[in-house]
Amino acid sequence: MSLLELTDICSGYGHFQALFGINLRIEEGETHAVIGANGAGKSTLLRTICGLIPTDSDKVRFDGQSIGQLPPHKRVGLGISYVPEGRWVFPSLTVAENLMVGAHSRRTGLWTMDKVYELFPLLSRLRQRQAFSLSGGEQQALAIARGLMSNPRLLLLDEVSLGLAPVVVEKIYEAMPAIVESGTTVLLVEQDVGQAMKFADRITCMLEGRQVLEGSPGEISSEEIFAAYFGV
Amino acid sequence: MVWVNDIIQGILLGGLYALFAAGLSLVFGVMRLVNLAHGDFGVMAAYISLVIVGSLNINPFYTLILVMIVMAIFGYLLQRGLLNYAMDAGPLQAILATFGIAIIIQNLLLEGFTANSKGLDAGVIENAFIRISDQVVIGWFPLLTIITSVIVLFGLQLFLGRTRMGRAFRATADNQRAAQLMGIDNRHLYGMAMAVALAIVAIGGVFIGIRTTFSPSAGPFRLIFAYEAVIIGGLGSLWGTLVGGIILGIAQVMGDHIQQGWGMLVGHLVFLAILAFRPQGLFAKQVQ
Amino acid sequence: MAAPLKVERYTRASRIALPLVAVVIIAAATVPAWGSSNIMKQGVTFLTLVALAQMWNLLAGYGGLVSVGQQAFIGIGAYTLWVFAEKFGINPFLCVPIAGVVAALFAFPTAGLAFRLRGGYFAVGTWVIAEVYRLLVTQISWLGGGSGVSINSAGAIERSTREAVVFWWALAVAVGSIALVYLVLRSRRGVALTAIRDDEIGARSLGVNITRSKLWVYVLAAFGTGATGAVIYLNLLRAQPEAAFSLQWSALMIFAVVIGGLGTIEGPIIGAIVFFALQQLLADYGTWYLILIGLIAALVVVFAQRGLWGAVYRRWPVDLFPVRRRLCLETVCFPEETPSPPTPAAPSSPAAVSPTSAAAPASPAAAPDAPSPPTAEPPEPES
């Protein structure tokens, strides 16, 4: 049984349908990247998994449980953590407080405040700073760290490289191996195809709400990716 | 020297307003809800105290804890039973729903207790005072009120700053969807926020009931003063609310001094002046 | 050369309804001829309620301004009537439009202050300002102070004449208020208002001056409310600050509109009818009637947001007062004659996210008619 099973996902926003029958299986311990151009529906997919967009109960199964109708805060308790596009750090709270709120669900595990500061030393220096005053890269690190504080089984990362300088993105990705090693399954959405290929076990490419390519980085050629990404 | 007394009385009165304002401020901060029934909840608390005093014949002070608990439970149920849905429907709908609740409460109280003014008799302390000088007199009860107010605000600050629930409140105020992603149950949280707000306003309601008389239609005035205190102090600042309450209190006392009956008007004018020249209030930390 | 496109205003239903309404108005105008004194007094109460409801609806349902302080203008209207009739000796019946104008003048400084606030804070702000007016009147002895004033010059007029003229004035303000809202909405300003209601930022980007539009609506509503206030007190003949500036006026207006249906012209009329009917039925029960109304209003506003008219509209979508424009080619029009009911306005507050459907029907002249559910995700940059 896969950790995450998505069946025929057709979610969207109000009257606007963004996804057309997505099917996906993620195994425990896997790292999976979803790539695709803007508007492909990648974020919509993650939002459906974390619960911000509800769907039919059975369409999303986590560890065998149907969670499609479960509200987001309950999914955190099950072990799903979503790091949103745009980061959504709590601006008036300090770095330390953001992390403490991340641990609200009281799930225990490897990730504690100390462990997280080890992972992102730059955060350690910023503990008492209010989050709104952080730079983009610092906020991204904080958002990921905060997402880890609930000791998730499945970590959903939405566009961590967005708006960040390549050097900063590199630094963020340096933390990934430690996250994966701790046993967390990672599903990330990434516009930076290079990083995605370096990092993930398997890749799904989406175009206009549909899956157009799937496989592991070793199997797929860059021409195939190019074609899938741009719909050529 | 008489003005000194006015200022002191104003400060003491301000403490009372701050008790009303704190709950309003909290609810708006966490949920962006302006509760038009807030003042009526304070009056409701006074009547509950009255009922308990009537049946047990005890000093109103002893009813405080019980009244706070009753109001807190009522607030939680009201929020989860109706107001959460009102907020789902939209900010406009939420305001109107609270307006409806205000009218309902005012008229239920009218049915239950008639329009006659009532008072809570706290005994000796109501009139006891400390004489500082010929012109400056500090009543024990108003002093107690402002001390309570400071303690409550301090407690609220500790709660918001140091507890898991308090941090959840602040996180939700910042970004309620992100808060959900942390495992925070919005609907429960809003219920708790309303419960806390009503527990605080219960203290204010009972204290006003002791200090002066109350009737079913007294709610709207309490709301207005609370709201003025919040705006003068600036949205999002707890201690700003206390300062706002004090400024309002001073304006009202001085107004009454200039001409009996002018107190409220002067208070309103000060409020409007702040609105005209510094609309964000004195210590604003939040956008409306 | 293709057949010309036309912009149509009238729906089939309105072609029947509007002439019917004219008949009803004419019939109503004959009431003074055969109605008793009591019927006329009730009539005035009902008609002025319709007028007040229309004005409040213009403000809140179309302008997005939730005011809990319209009683300020009722009081101003009442006292203007007294000042001009008693102090300046003008025929009291001519004072009605004057009251409207004076109220409109007061609306400018009122708005100047109140508009610094948004959403719920704006609501309470309008209330505070109304209180200020009340307190000022109470303190100024020239205006009669706390004990109030009497409109003696009207009282001196022979009763059946007075009652007839007051009734016709009430009819005039009721019809006038409906006509006013109708005309405003069909004008360019009206389309701007609807645009603001649906998406404030979008409207601003198209060059709509938000503040001016809202100010304009506020002043108009004040005019209507002030004139109606004068009519009400022509009927009552005695004004006291406590009553003239009472919050209960707001309760009446708000409940009538909410129950009938916010954001439509038909709604407030239905609401006024229901409210009035309930008032007559439950008059003996005093406060219970208010409790019931408050409860109904609170429940309606949350669970049946479009009110009674909205419920009717869903079954039989009929625009009695058509304000939307449709694009027609020969006999085929878009949108069809069964659009969905309009969404009530969100109050002017940055915290109110205006959920716009990412895929509004691409029609040049039709207003976006897909009511977006309030809990829909606002479209963020999609990956």
Image (spheres, helix red, strand yellow):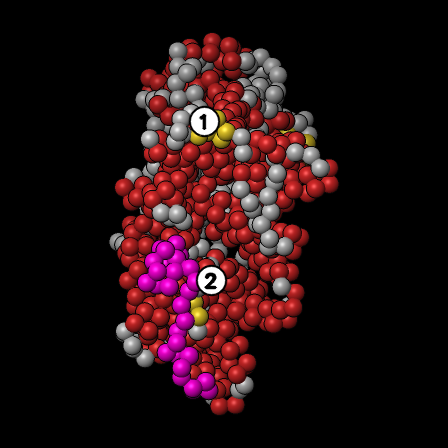
Q: Secondary structure at mark 2?
A: helix
Please, is residue A28 above or below residue C48 in the view?
A: above
- For image coordinates 46% across by 41% down, the residue present is B226
Tell me where the magenta segment starts and ends, as one range: C134-161
Q: Residue A63, relative to residue C88: is it above or below? A: above
Q: Residue furthest front?
A: B134
**The C terminus of chain C sits in image quarter:** top left
**Rendered-image quadrant of the N terminus of chain C:** bottom left
* Mark 1 touches mark 2? (CB < 8 Å): no
x then y, percent, for residue B195: 59, 36
Q: Give the residue pinned by disc 2.
A: C243
Q: Quadrant of residue B131?
A: top left
> In the rendered image, which quarter is residue B44 located in?
top right
In this view, the residue in front, A51 or C344, is C344
* Whether residue C82 can be seen here: yes
Q: Secondary structure at mark 1?
A: strand
Across and down, in percent, residue C46 comes to 51, 73
For this rendering, which residue is in front, B175 or A49? Answer: B175
Q: Which mark is residue B131?
A: 1
Are the residues under marks 1 and 2 on the same chain?
Answer: no
Q: Which label is found at residue C76? A: none
Classed neighbour count for the residue bearing mark 1: other residues with Cα under 10 Å, few (<14), some (14–19), many (≥20): few
Principal SS element in the magenta part? helix
Q: Amino acid at mark 2?
A: Ala
